[in-house]
């Protein structure tokens, strides 16, 4: 019984870091890897997102990950260099801090300064007891 020939021809490619690795051939000029044999330092788009990273502007894939998904046939994912990626814009500490500050402002009564666990009406920025105490329940703009 002869051994089953590999589907793709293995070949050696030089990586960006000068390392030589075996890949499963080239596709669109990019080395193709399978699950488990993609070199360290290369991740898919969704793996970048899991690490709170995103592609740098103009960052192109350096390799392809080819795998089979039950019922879907062959899947191809682009592989990117993780060292070229940048922190995701939507998760920067500065942005998180400003969102937190805004949330806090929306929950803090302007009169008594108490912080509530839900948003206060933006017409008065006051909690209910303070609105009752001052008689100011907020005036809709059109009635002013
Ligand atoms: Zn209050």
Image (cartoon, rainbow, N blue to C red):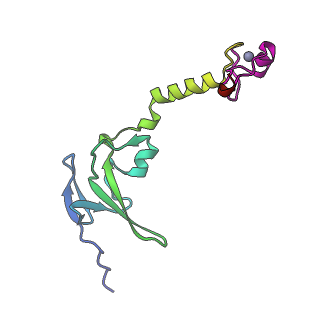
Can you tell which quarter of the image residue 25 is in?
bottom left
Visible residue check, residue 92:
yes
Which quarter of the figure is the C terminus placed in? top right
- Quick check: 129 above or below 62? above
| Residue sitting nearer the eye, 99 or 25 | 99
The residue positioned 38% from the left and 43% from the top of the image is 54
Residue 13's x, y, as percent?
Answer: 20, 58
Q: Residue furthest bottom?
A: 1
User: Does residue 3 appear to the left or right of 131 in the view shown?
Assistant: left
Can you tell which quarter of the image residue 117 is in?
top right
Residue 18's x, y, as percent?
Answer: 18, 48
Which quarter of the figure is the N terminus placed in? bottom left
Quarter of the render that holds ligand 1: top right
Q: For the magenta stretch, what is the residue range?
A: 113-139
Q: Report the number of discs.
A: 0
On whether residue 46 falls in the magenta region, the answer is no
User: Does residue 63 appear to the left or right of 54 in the view shown?
Assistant: left
The residue positioned 23% from the left and 63% from the top of the image is 28
The residue positioned 25% from the left and 60% from the top of the image is 31
On whether residue 119 falls in the magenta region, the answer is yes
Magenta part, dominant SS: loop
| Residue sitting nearer the eye, 33 or 89 | 89
Residue 72's x, y, as percent?
Answer: 46, 71
- Quick check: 12 above or below 134? below
Visible residue check, residue 120:
no
Residue 33's x, y, as percent?
Answer: 31, 61
- Quick check: 88 above or below 31? above
Q: Residue furthest front?
A: 143
The residue positioned 76% from the left and 16% from the top of the image is 130
| Residue sitting nearer the eye, 70 or 96 | 96
User: Does residue 36 appear to the left or right of 114 in the view shown?
Assistant: left
């Amino acid at each position: 019984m002869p051994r089953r020939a590999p589907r793709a021809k293995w070949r050696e490619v030089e990586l960006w870091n000068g390392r030589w690795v075996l890949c499963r051939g080239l596709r669109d000029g990019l080395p193709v890897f399978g699950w488990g044999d993609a070199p360290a330092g290369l991740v898919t788009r969704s793996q970048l997102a899991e690490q709170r990273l995103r592609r740098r502007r103009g960052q192109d894939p350096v390799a392809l990950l080819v795998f089979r998904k039950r019922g879907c046939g062959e899947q191809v994912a682009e592989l990117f260099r993780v060292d070229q990626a940048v922190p995701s814009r939507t998760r920067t500490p500065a942005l998180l801090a400003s969102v937190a500050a805004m949330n806090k402002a929306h929950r803090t009564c302007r009169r008594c300064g108490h912080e509530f666990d839900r948003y206060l009406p933006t017409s008065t920025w006051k909690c209910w007891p303070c609105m009752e105490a001052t008689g100011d329940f907020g005036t809709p703009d059109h009635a002013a």
